[in-house]
Amino acid sequence: GKQRTCWDLLAYSIIVDDIVRHDGTTFMERLGGGGPQTIFGARVFAHAADKQTNVALCARVGNDLPDACLSWLREMGVDLAAIAYDEHLPTPRAWQVCECDGKRTQVWRTQHGDGQIAMLRPAWCAETMAAHVVHLGIDVEHPPWDVLAGAREAGALVSVETFKPTSGPLTSQALAKLSSAVDVLSPNLVEARAMMGDDETVNAKSAAVRLRDEHGFENALVRAGELGAVYAHRGGVCVAPAVGNVDVVDETGCGNACCGAFVSAMHDRQSPADCLAWGMTAASFMLEHVGVPEATLPKTVELEARARYHVVRERTLDKVM
């Protein structure tokens, strides 16, 4: 059979983004989706922390995948073994319409049916796939239970980012089922409130603690934009500020970039506060670019990333709670 590599990180999904800014400027054919965004964050961590890591991306793409997107993946050192070509369907593609308040609306350009969902989230293949960490974006109301179970059975740490708020609060049974299937849950604050039926008075810290204590999530990372992030873990609660003095260009992908660095640091057995500070660091670089930054960036910002990490780490609190 095929030789299996055990990847340090396997991230899911590719979308080709056509981005429209609030002032009408467009950025066409940008590589997007959770996979590249997560891998970018992982690479920022690996370069700045001087770690050797092997990363892979799982997705199905059409023959129309732009050359620039493939070049980016190759330059980032991504193992392409888990990328499959689909003869019949185009690569998932979407408009990303950004408002000046940070609100973003995704409008699919390719037909969004079962075929496309299968391209974004291919089934887990036990024969060919093995990873220490698997990260994917999920719709909390319809999680891909087969992928979560497959990754878990293969011994991976399973990390999920929620990519949209739920239409209403989830039942405690639904939250319990999800918490037993994943190791890390990372919603933004709006998504965390929606899934628990909380109002706007609930802050990131109380949301993260509730996800851990009331709903059984062992690692709850709640991201709150410029307010920073909170990580509730078994031993306590970490609170980190966002990186200051950053040129805010585009918030798309900051959550996945944060998760990519965070889970990479976690796999590297760094402390909870260190993991959170690395996540905030990676997100700050994503924030300064439209779409995923160029593939050379993690290497060129190595020293700046270390400096940002140290500033955030000094201000990250870790309390037993």
Image (spheres, rainbow, N blue to C red):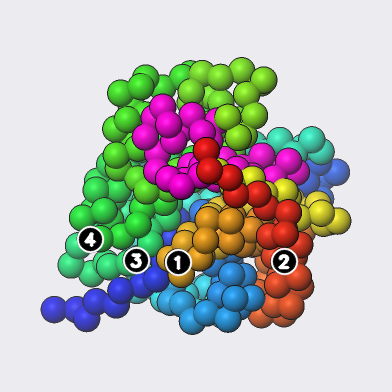
Of the residues tagged 3 and 2, which is closer to the observer? 2
Question: Which SS class for mark 1?
Answer: loop
Outermost residue, front side:
320
Q: Residue at x 47, y 62 (%)?
A: 266
The magenta-colored residue range is 207-236
Q: Residue at x 36, y 72 (%)?
A: 7
Question: Which SS class for mark 2?
Answer: helix
Q: Is residue 232 above or below residue 257?
A: above
| The N terminus: image quadrant | bottom left
Q: Is residue 110 above or below residue 40?
A: above
Of the residues tagged 4 and 1, which is closer to the observer? 1
Q: Is residue 74 above or below residue 261?
A: below
The residue at which mark 1 appears reads as 269
Q: Earlier in the sequence, mark 1 or mark 2?
A: 1
Q: Amino acid at mark 1?
A: Arg
Of the residues tagged 3 and 1, which is closer to the observer? 1
Of the residues tagged 4 and 2, which is closer to the observer? 2
Outermost residue, left side:
1
Q: Are marks 1 and 2 in contact (CB under 8 Å)?
A: no
The residue at which mark 2 appears reads as 310
As for residue 235 lying within the magenta part, the answer is: yes
The residue at which mark 3 appears reads as 132
Q: Report, in whole angstroms, how far the alpha carbon at label 1 lies from the one at label 2.
A: 18 Å
Q: Amino acid at mark 4?
A: Ala
| Classed neighbour count for the residue bearing mark 1: other residues with Cα under 10 Å, few (<14), some (14–19), many (≥20) | few
The residue at which mark 4 appears reads as 154
Q: Earlier in the sequence, mark 4 or mark 2?
A: 4
Q: Are marks 3 and 4 in contact (CB under 8 Å)?
A: no
Question: Which SS class for mark 3?
Answer: strand
